[in-house]
Image: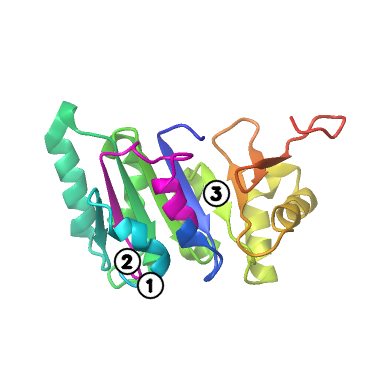
Amino acid sequence: LPPLPQSILFVSPPATGKTNAIVNLLTSRRFYRGRFSRVYIISPTIFLDKSAHALREDPDIQLYSEYDDSIVEAIVQFQREQAESAERICIVFDDIIQLPGVNHRSSCYSMICRFRHITKGGMVIYSSQMLKGVPPLVRSCSKIVIVGNPIQSIKEIDKLTEEYGAMFGGEESFQVLMKQAHSKGRYNFAVMRLDLNPAEFWENWDRKLYPLCKNNVEA
């Protein structure tokens, strides 16, 4: 389990299991269930997506289907006012680029520079259907990147390769790893652990693909 604090970026097209993956992260004992006093989720589909039922039923999860900077600023202010008694929280921004009021200068993005303090060692999650759907600041500060399957286009693969390939042995190696991680079909995720040195590449959370030992046995 990646330790907290943690910043996660999902790059996952529609109908690839992204909502289920976020639900598992927040509600499964294998992941972060019980690790946050409160979870805030901003998502245009949070009240419509059947996969998000468990999130809607949880009294410790606060939901928003619209975006305004004042929502983020109110969370930040509340945490600041609690001072030493502030508790660990998680904030999820799910496909918010399509919401009115969101641009690359919005508070939802700029807060990633201070998320450790704002969340009191908690977690921030961003999701986007495309890599460039989030600004460079979020991409550079996200320490776990999770890529859904199938990727929408060759151009999108090229963008992912340009962004992350150098961390995983170069462009060709990166694309081979991506194919391996996605080889079992839809709902398989490629997970990049950029919080580690060297960075690690996993199929889901179960099988490490990179780096491997010299004898080709998983390290």
Closer to the chain start, of discs 3 and 1, is 1
**Place of residue 26 in the rendered image (x, y in percent of width and height, measured from the top left):** 39, 47
Q: Secondary structure at mark 1?
A: helix
Circle 1 or circle 2, nearest the eye: 1
Q: CA distance from mark 3 to mark 2?
A: 21 Å
Residue located beneath label 1 in the image: 98
At 35% from the left and 65% from the top, the residue drawn is 103
Query: Residue 145 has which mark?
Result: 3
What residue type is disc 3 on?
Val
Q: For the residues labelled 1 and 2, say whether their Cβ atoms are less than 8 Å apart.
A: yes
**Image quadrant of residue 88?**
top left
Residue neighbourhood size for the residue with mark 3, other residues' Cα within 10 Å, grouped as few (<14), some (14–19), many (≥20): many
Count how many numbered circles sit on residues in the image. 3
Q: Amino acid at mark 1?
A: Gln
Q: Is residue 100 above or below residue 34?
A: below
State the residue position of label 2.
102
- Mark 3 vs mark 2: give the one in front: 3
Would you call the spot at circle 2 few (<14 residues within 10 Å), some (14-19), or many (20 or more)?
A: some
Q: Residue at x 20, y 48 (%)?
A: 75
Q: Secondary structure at mark 2?
A: loop
| Horizontal and vertical percent position of residue 206 | 64, 42
- What is the secondary structure assignment of the residue under circle 3? strand
Do the numbered discs 3 and 2 sit on residues whose CB atoms are within 8 Å? no
Magenta extent: 21-46
Q: Tell me if residue 40 is in the magenta stretch.
A: yes
Q: Name the residue located 52 percent from the left edge and 63 percent from the top edge.
A: 132
**Which of the marked residues, 3 or 2, is nearer the chain's N terminus?**
2
